[in-house]
């Protein structure tokens, strides 16, 4: 008997309410359907999907090095495909009972390679636009913030190695009043305004603006330069704030509790 979508969802242990903005709004509706197709129509193994995801992510990196606005926009779409596959490989592994430590490690290291490179690629593109070496320093700072943010979580898991119940488990949305839900949506909007996905989205919009409304901006050169200069300090400060929060609270912030 062919597996249904609900069968795959139960096997993949994927709830509709997920941590993270993309997983809460869009990805549950896409990833589980792609997982269902892969499980019922192909013989792809989880590690093969992870390697495909890596290739797609590196393609996005190459696109963000470009000064062509439409290549950058294509790179943004490619990044979202990489992000989608990043979840599908785990779902397939759980659904087919093919989970392994090495597979999980390969999945995590893929993110650690592609995410910082996407940020630095944007710095390279701005340097190609304006020719100012200071832009590379700013790109490095933004990239360092991205790496530091990941390390804040990774070090917490390492510090708790061997302890029980250290996973950031998924929870259902609590029942709240209408006013509380509106406050939660405002907090969600604040989360969506920063982070890697927001930065890449702003960068793609700025690349189009550089093409449609070309002008020299004082100090930053281009609209893409403006996005990079704004993101760099925010990236570092956000990472430091996460480190301080985890140290003081002894837990990773659970963004799924926002709603």
Image (tube, helix red, strand yellow):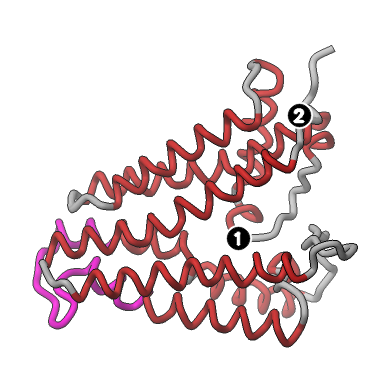
Start-end of magenta stretch: 205-231
Please tell me which residue is depicted at 36% across the width and 74% down the height of the picture: 141
Picture coordinates of residue 117, whole percent (x, y) = 38, 55
Please tell me which residue is depicted at 73% across the width and 87% down the height of the picture: 248
Q: Is mark 1 on a helix, strand or loop?
A: helix
Q: Is 217 placed left or right of 44 in the picture?
A: left
Q: Which of 8 and 124 is in front in this view?
A: 124
- Residue behind mark 1: 21
* Residue 118 is at least partly visible in this image: yes
| Quadrant into which the C terminus falls | bottom right
Q: Is 127 placed left or right of 193 in the picture?
A: left
Q: What element carries label 2?
A: helix
Please tell me which residue is depicted at 29% across the width and 75% down the height of the picture: 138
Please tell me which residue is depicted at 47% across the width and 46% down the height of the picture: 80
Task: Give the Cα distance between marks 1 and 2.
Answer: 23 Å
Picture coordinates of residue 76, whole percent (x, y) = 38, 49
Q: Which of 236 and 193 is in front in this view?
A: 236
Residue 131 quadrant: bottom left
- Residue behind mark 2: 5
The residue carrying pointer 1 sits among few (fewer than 14), some (14 to 19) or many (20 or more) residues within 10 Å by Cα, namely: some
Q: Does the magenta stretch include residue 45?
A: no
Residue 213 quadrant: bottom left
Picture coordinates of residue 244, whole percent (x, y) = 63, 85
């Amino acid at each position: 008997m062919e597996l249904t979508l609900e069968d795959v969802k139960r096997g993949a242990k994927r709830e509709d309410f997920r941590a993270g903005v993309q997983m809460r709004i869009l990805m549950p509706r896409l990833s589980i359907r792609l997982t269902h197709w892969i499980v019922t129509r192909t013989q792809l193994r989880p590690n093969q999907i992870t390697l495909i995801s890596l290739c797609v992510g590196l393609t996005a990196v190459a696109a963000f090095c470009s000064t062509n606005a439409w290549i950058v926009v294509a790179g943004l779409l490619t990044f979202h495909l990489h992000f989608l596959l990043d979840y599908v490989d785990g779902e397939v592994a759980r659904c087919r009972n093919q989970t392994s430590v090495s597979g999980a490690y390969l999945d995590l290291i893929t993110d650690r390679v592609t995410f910082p490179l996407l940020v630095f690629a944007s710095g390279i593109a701005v340097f190609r636009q304006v020719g100012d070496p200071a832009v590379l320093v700013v790109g490095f700072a933004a990239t360092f913030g991205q790496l530091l943010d990941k390390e804040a979580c990774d070090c917490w898991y390492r510090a708790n190695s061997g302890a029980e119940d250290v996973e950031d488990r998924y929870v259902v949305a609590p029942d709240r009043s209408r006013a509380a839900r509106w406050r939660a949506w405002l907090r969600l909007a604040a989360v969506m305004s920063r982070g890697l996905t927001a930065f890449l989205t702003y960068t793609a919009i700025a690349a189009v603006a550089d093409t449609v409304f070309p002008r020299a901006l004082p100090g930053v050169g281009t609209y893409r330069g403006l996005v990079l200069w704004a993101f760099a300090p925010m990236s570092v400060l956000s990472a430091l704030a996460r480190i301080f929060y985890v140290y003081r609270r002894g837990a990773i912030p659970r963004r799924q509790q926002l709603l």
